[in-house]
C-alpha cells in the first residue's frame, strides 16, 4: 500500500500539470491553490517541457550522447531519456524521496539512472559510473527548474563548478523564472522567501565563462512552428563551454 505524503512536492505538482500519474491529492490541492492565485499553469509547464525536448534534441544533434540532469523531479512525461533513448542519462535531485520515486520509475531503463546530488555541493560528485563520456568527451548538462531556488551566489558558484568539471564543447541547458509573478502577489507569496525571480537582462552575468547566444522566453527558443501562446514565465537558452 502506497503511503500518501502529507506535504506537496513541486516535482509532483509539475507532473500533475503535465498530465502525468505520479502525484497525490496533496499535490493536486497545492497546484489548484496556486492556480487560484495565478491562473492556469498546465500550458506553461507543457511549453517548458517542449523547450526541454527542443534543447535536448539540439544538443544531441551536436554529437552529445551523455546527459546529466539536475533537479530532475519525476523522470516521465517526455523527459530526457525518452527524448534521446540511445543516450546515457543521469537524473539527480537533492530530495531523497524524489530520488527513490524516480529510481523506481527507471528500474527497467537500460541507459537512464537516478542519483541523489545537490547542485550547490558538486565538489566530489562523480557521475562517471553512469555516464561513460564523463571526463572523456563533451556532455550535456540540463539545469532546469533550479535557478529560482538558488540565490545569485549559489547559482553562479554551481554553474562555475559545472564549467570546471565538464570537457570543452559541453552544453548547458538552463532556464530561470522571469518577473512574471511580480504582478501576482498572492501567488508570489506562496513561493516563499527562497524563491528568486530575475530580470532577463541581468541573467547572463551569472553564467560565468559559459557562452550563450541568446536568452529568450522558452516558448520562443527555436520553436517548431509558431511559439506557444503562453506567458513569458520562464526564460532560458543553451550555453556552451567553448573549444
Image (tube, rainbow, N blue to C red):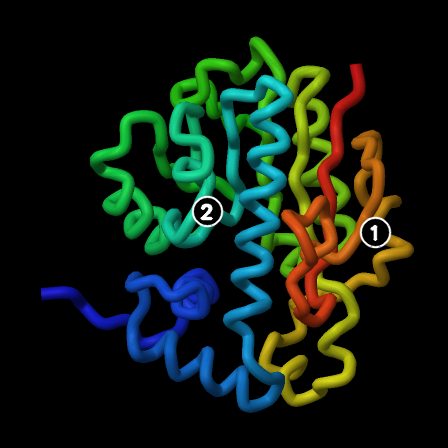
Q: Quadrant of residue 9?
A: bottom left
- Image side of residue 240 versus residue 189, left or right: right
- Image side of residue 195 versus residue 121, left or right: right
Q: List x then y, in percent, for residue 130.
A: 40, 23
Q: List x then y, in percent, for residue 182.
A: 77, 79
Q: What residue is drawn where x is 67% and y is 68%?
A: 229
Question: Of circles 2 and 1, which is in front?
Answer: 1
Q: What residue is drawn where x is 28% and y is 71%?
A: 5
Q: Earlier in the sequence, mark 2 or mark 1?
A: 2
Disc 2 packing (10 Å; few <14; some 14–19; many ≥20): many
**Dot 1 lies on which element?**
helix
Disc 1 packing (10 Å; few <14; some 14–19; many ≥20): some
Q: List x then y, in percent, for residue 226.
A: 69, 57
Residue designated by label 2: 93
Q: What residue is drawn where x is 58% and y is 39%?
A: 142
**Dot 2 lies on which element?**
strand
Q: What residue is drawn where x is 75% and y is 57%?
A: 217
Residue designated by label 1: 203
> In this orientation, which residue lies closer to the viewer: 24 or 56?
56
Q: Is 22 above or below relative to 32?
A: above
> In this orientation, which residue lies closer to the viewer: 127 or 55?
55
For the residues labelled 2 and 1, the Cα–Cα distance comes to 23 Å
Q: Quadrant of the N terminus?
A: bottom left
Amino acid at each position: 500500500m502506497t503511503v500518501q505524503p502529507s506535504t506537496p512536492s513541486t516535482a509532483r505538482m509539475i507532473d500533475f500539470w503535465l498530465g502525468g500519474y505520479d502525484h497525490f491529492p496533496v499535490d493536486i490541492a497545492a497546484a489548484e491553490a496556486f492556480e487560484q492565485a495565478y491562473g492556469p499553469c498546465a500550458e506553461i509547464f507543457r511549453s517548458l517541457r517542449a523547450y526541454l525536448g527542443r534543447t535536448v534534441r539540439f544538443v544531441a544533434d551536436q554529437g552529445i550522447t551523455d546527459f546529466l540532469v539536475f533537479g530532475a523531479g519525476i523522470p516521465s512525461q517526455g523527459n530526457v531519456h525518452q527524448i534521446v533513448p540511445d543516450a546515457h542519462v543521469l537524473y539527480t535531485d537533492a530530495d531523497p524521496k524524489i530520488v527513490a520515486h524516480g529510481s523506481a520509475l527507471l528500474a527497467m531503463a537500460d541507459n537512464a539512472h537516478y542519483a541523489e546530488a545537490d547542485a550547490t555541493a558538486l565538489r566530489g560528485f562523480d557521475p562517471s559510473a553512469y555516464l561513460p563520456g564523463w571526463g572523456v568527451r563533451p556532455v550535456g548538462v540540463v539545469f532546469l527548474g533550479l535557478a529560482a531556488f538558488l540565490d545569485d551566489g549559489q547559482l553562479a558558484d554551481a554553474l562555475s563548478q559545472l564549467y570546471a568539471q565538464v570537457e570543452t564543447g559541453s552544453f548547458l541547458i538552463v532556464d530561470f523564472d522571469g518577473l512574471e509573478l511580480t504582478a501576482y502577489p498572492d501567488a508570489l507569496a506562496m513561493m516563499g522567501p527562497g524563491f528568486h525571480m530575475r530580470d532577463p537582462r541581468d541573467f547572463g552575468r551569472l553564467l560565468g565563462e559559459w557562452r550563450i547566444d541568446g536568452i529568450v522566453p522558452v516558448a520562443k527558443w527555436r520553436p517548431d512552428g509558431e511559439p506557444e501562446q503562453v506567458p513569458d514565465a520562464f526564460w532560458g537558452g543553451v550555453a556552451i563551454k567553448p573549444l
